[in-house]
Every structure is written in structure tokens, then in C-alpha cells.
Amino acid sequence: MKITLDTPLSEIPSVGDKRSKSLARLELNSVSDLLFFYPRRYLDLRNFKKISMLSPGETASVKGKVAAREEKALRGRTSYLNVALSDGTGVLFTVFFNQPYLKDTFALNREFFISGRVEEYKGRIQMVNPLYEEYRDGKRDWLLPVYPLSEGLTHKYIRRLIKLVMDRLAEYPEEILPLKNRLDLKLPNVKFALRNIHFPLSDMNLEKARNYLIFREFFILQMGLLLRKEKEQKKSKVCDTGINEGLIDVFESLLPFKLTKHQKKVMLEIVGDIKKGMVVSRMIHGEVGSGKTVVAVFALWLFSRTGVQTALLAPTEILAEQHYLNWQEFFLKQEIPVALLLGQFPEKEKNVTREGIKNGDIKVLMGTHALLTENLQFKNLGLAVVDEQHKFGVKQRELLKEKGKDVHYIVMSATPIPRSVALTFYGALDISTIGELPKGERRVLTYIFQNEEKERIYRFLEYQNSQGRQGYVVTPAIEGNENIKSAVDEYDKIKRDLPDVPCGLIHGRLPHKEKEEIMRRFREKKTGILVATSVIESGIDVPDASYIVIEQAERFGLAQLHQLRGRVGRSGDVGYCILVPESYDDGDVMNRLESFVAAESGFEIAEIDLELRGQGDLLGVRQHGIPPLKIGNIVRDMELLTIARSEAQEVVKKLPPEEIEKKFLKGVFTND
Ligand code: ADP
Ligand code: MG
């Protein structure tokens, strides 16, 4: 039988019905899928331990002879096989569940490599369902691939199947990497890479194969992203909007402060896009407090002046409200009608606003998710701005711009995005960075306190209040249970223990009117301590807040902690951030929090976060319509990623989109 890349695995003789289902569960349907199914890691058979040196908890490999075996049937259909292996220094017990046929494999005196997690059981050292490979003198592969498996499959089987496929393969996949890149980066060809990723003959071959496949993966990814971006920008509508750089000065003259250099730079970039006749598609990113809002307002103002409608979407009602309160007057003075739309507003009020949007009376609309509902129709939406974009799902944040035709699109991110992530997942957006803070570097001192030091924290709160300073106390939940601290309880406690400090409580479940009132009182300094959930994390700007206490800090992500910390020290004075973890003696927790204390910029934190949490989790990869990365890692392989990006750019410049699609992408990208 001739096998091609498209041959379905189910047509290969040794693949039965059951196996083909198991393979499909791993998304392995065709020969090509199988070739690009990468091992998760490799077992290095040169690297084994003496059995006497094993300790419980570690993952290790040993080499030993079968000294005894015993098969046991349990209740129902369960059975297990016990195999004792000896290497002269000790005995390792291995347990295999439901694989009675292994009895013949583990014949007495045969020698095996065994690899797995060491456990202690009834005083013996054992491994459950370990990997195994018979040791025979002579030719042998030292690096054994370990695949992610599904039920009904073994490593041995996958290995055999790949071998069979490779032996009979009519033709390997087309070589898509330019020769120049392969020479520069010392990368092999595709055939070498695939053979060596599955059956590495040496460490060096494996290294080369990996680099090749990582680069190839990034290269395809970038190509797809660049193509998507090009498609977006082709939708340009060259028309004379009268927009030019001079308007930045006009805008500045309407503000109570001077724009920073970086704010101006980003505004220039936006104006530049428009002058080129492009549909703006930009992410503005900058540290918390860098003044992104003004830039967004500039864009709203700029476009509203040309007669189109504009909208600003914020993730929380408090933030939408803040934007509205801060900028309503500005727009009204320019005779640009502006409105706020929140889900919580009475139906009647919402209807009035919706009507004004539909007939075009309202030019600037600010609000929350209420902007996304179907019953809101714009007359001529021209610009959609999404604040704190990471708080929205991808689909969600794109809903707004779909309420018009060729809508200009700006998203703002306070979570600094590592360059690698930006290149990968936001490759379709242009990126503008605001790299400085308007009031100079902010200083927030961060400390970790133990739960038992609560008394000290309360004294600190009391002292701050006596000095006329206000701040936040944040808890992970609104209402808690025995495990989670709640804002409601904390509020009661502070009121009881610090009766002289005016204290407020805010969380997402309060009615809008109440939230508005509470924030107003806090802004006016009628409240000293604001007890809150993470609702205050996004964008809240109360310049006089000078401290934030975060209870059960380990329950927040690092990026989230950074956002919270960004709420204080905004006036130019030193701010304080106090973390109160519950698990003070948990090493991992403390390491994470200490790295947070040490990290100065959100940028550093994003990098740490990415390392700790991994890439998929961070970004909800699939949502982007981007194929998940199978071998590349955007932190570890950053260098290859950057090169892949610029090489892909070269190709996109040279080849027409259809050809790129056909040659490189072939349906890998899903959503357009
Ligand atoms: P973020 O980038 O976190 O969204 P904001 O837009 O909320 O930051 O801005 C933080 C604070 O800085 C606000 O109070 C804002 O009015 C102020 N601000 C912004 N730009 C300037 C500037 N050029 N000069 C002085 N203050 C500014
Ligand atoms: Mg903001």
C-alpha cells in the first residue's frame, strides 16, 4: 500500500476501528497529522539511577532484571500485574493495571528500562504504570519519545505506527522554509526534522529537528497573522476626512494638562493610519497610569468631528461611569453629544439612549456590555474603542466593531504584553506603546504581611486615615465561606475594629446607583477605606488613594495584583501595597508573591506570569482562531519567533495572498 500525507489513518492495515477512534481523540486523522504529532518529552535511556538511590516523589529511570511477577484479579474487570525488578542494589516494584498481556513481556530475567514516578507504598518503593523498554544488547534508540496518549494507545504502538508510515510514505511534506533561513539558522530539511523528532539518532539531531519544527510552526503562524492583517487593511476607505496632525495640538489646547511625548506619538500613529487611508486597527498598550484614556478620548473626538459615531467599551460599570464623569463635560463643550449606557439602567432610560444612537443624535457612546446587545443599533458607527481589552473575550470585543461597516478599531491594554505574545497573538493588530508615566515614575512600596499581623495592618490603616490618606482593602470574594475571605465580612470587621475610620464597601453586585454614590463619596474623600472586590482592578483612577491591602493575595494572578497595585501612588506620592497571603508557609506561593514584590514594571510581571502559567492558558489561544502551538514556546523560543516574524513579512510582501494561502496555510487558520 502506498501511503500519502492525506491517507486517513483508519485505512492503514494495523489501525483497527478501535484504535482509529483513540487516534481521532488526539486529533490524529491523517498520516500528516501523525507525522506532526510531537513527543512531549524523551526518555534518555543512558541516564538511569540505581534502585537504591530512588526517593519517593521523584520521576526517574532505572534498569533492572525481572525477579518476580504476580498477576491479580480484582473485583469486576480490573486486574493488575506486579513485577519486581532488581539491579543488584535494590528491588523496585512496578504495578500495571489492566494489562494482563504484559505477563509475557515481563518474562523472568529479561532486562528492562523503567521510567516513572517513584512512590512509597507499604514501605516499598514502587512505580505505577511506568514506561518500559526492553534492554537488549546491540542497536537501540537511546532517546525514547514519550507522546501524549489517549485510552487504548501505548507509546510502543504509536512508535510502530509512525515507523510504518515513514517507511512507506510516498513523499514527505513540501519544504516550505526558504533555503536562506535554513542555512542561516543551520536548520535541516523537513524530512530530517520529522524523522529525528520521532526517532532521534543523537542529541544534536534532536536539537536540529526541534529547532526546524519550532521555526516552521512560528513561520506559518506569522504568515497567517500577517495575511489576516493585510485583509483587514485592504478594507480601507480612502476619503478626505480632513484629519491631520494639527488636530493633536487643537486637542491638547482643550485639556487642562500638556500631553506627554508618548501620548502624542501614539496620536500621531493613529492620524498616520487614517491619512494612509487605512482602517485603524491598533492596540495601545502602556503601564497602568500611563494615560491611555486621553489617547482614546482623542480618537473618539477626532472621529466624532467627521460626523461618524464612536463608542468606548469598558469592562465594569464603575470604570464606564468614571470615563463618562471625567469626559462628559469635555464633549459637551465641543457640542458633541455623549451618553452613557449601562445594563443596570432602567429600561426606559436605555430606550431613550438606544433611540438616540439609532437616529444618530448621540455621537459618543460609553458603556459596558450593554453596548454589545443586539437591540443596540448605530446609525453610522465609525470607531470602536475597547478599554482593558483583556477583560473581554475575543469574540466579545469584536462584537462592537461589527455594529458598523469598516469600523476603526482601537483596543487598550493595561496588562503589558510581552513582546513575544504581542507578536504571536496580536500579530494582526498594530501596536502603539506609551512607555512613560505623566507624573514620572510611580513609587509603590510592596510588602508581604502574615495573617497574624492583622493588628499591625489595622494600626497602619488607622494611621493613614489620621494623616488624611485613603486607600483600598481588597478581598477575593463578595461573600465568602470558611476558605475565602469576603468583602462583606471584612467591611463589618473594619467598621467594628476601627469605628473612627469612615469605611465604604463596593462590589459588582450592588445596584448601579449605589456604586456611583460609593465611588463619589470615596473620590470626595468622605470615605477613608474602601473595602472592595477586584471590581476596582480595572482602570479606577482616584489619584489620592495611597495604599492597598490585598487579602489572600495568592488567589489573584500576578497581572491582577499588578493592576490592583496600580490603583495607588497616582498622585506622585509614594504608595503602599500590602499583600496578606493565607498560605504563608507554602513555598510556591511565597516565591510567586516575592517575585511580584521584586518586579517593578508590569512588563516584568507579564513575563513572569507567562513563564509560570504557560502560553495557552494565558491567552485562550483557540479563541483567536489561531492554531494552538504544538512545539514552539513563545517565551523559550522568542528568538526564533522574532526571526520567523520578519521572514514571514518578507514572503507576504512578495507573494500574492492566494498563493500564500495555498502553499503555507492550507486551512490551518480557521476563523476568517
Ligand atoms: P491608564 O493608562 O492606566 O488608563 P489613565 O488614563 O487612567 O491611565 O490616566 C491616569 C491619570 O493620569 C489620570 O488621572 C489622567 O487624568 C492623568 N493624566 C493622563 N495624561 C496626563 C498628562 N499628559 N499630564 C498629566 N496627567 C495626565
Ligand atoms: Mg485605563
Image (tube, rainbow, N blue to C red):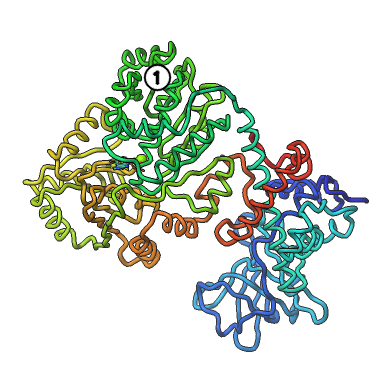
- Front residue of this view, candidates 438 and 1: 438
At a point 39% along the width and 42% down the height, the residue shown is: 263
At a point 84% along the width and 54% down the height, the residue shown is: 172
Above or below residue 493? Residue 402 is: above
Residue 187 percent coordinates (x, y): 74, 63
- Front residue of this view, candidates 405 and 618: 405
Q: Secondary structure at mark 1?
A: loop
- Front residue of this view, candidates 289 and 394: 289
Extreme residue in the left direction? 500
**Residue 463 shows in this picture:** yes
Give the quadrant of residue 526: top left
Residue 376 percent coordinates (x, y): 44, 18
Residue 632 percent coordinates (x, y): 63, 57
The response on whether ligand 1 sits within 8 Å of label 1 is no
Task: Name the side, left or right, on which 504 lies relative to 538.
Answer: left
Give the quadrant of residue 480: top left
Residue 277 percent coordinates (x, y): 58, 29
Give the quadrant of residue 661: top right
Circle 1 sits on which residue? 363
Above or below residue 273? Residue 8 is: below
Crowd rating for badge 1 (residues with CA inside 10 Å; few <14, some 14–19, many 20+): many
Extreme residue in the front direction? 246
Task: Name the side, left or right, on which 125 lies relative to 447.
Answer: right
Amino acid on which the number 1 mark rests in the picture: Lys
Extreme residue in the bottom direction? 88
Ligand 2: quadrant of the figure: top left
**Residue 121 shows in this picture:** no
Image quadrant holding the C terminus, namely top right
At a point 35% along the width and 64% down the height, the residue shown is: 598
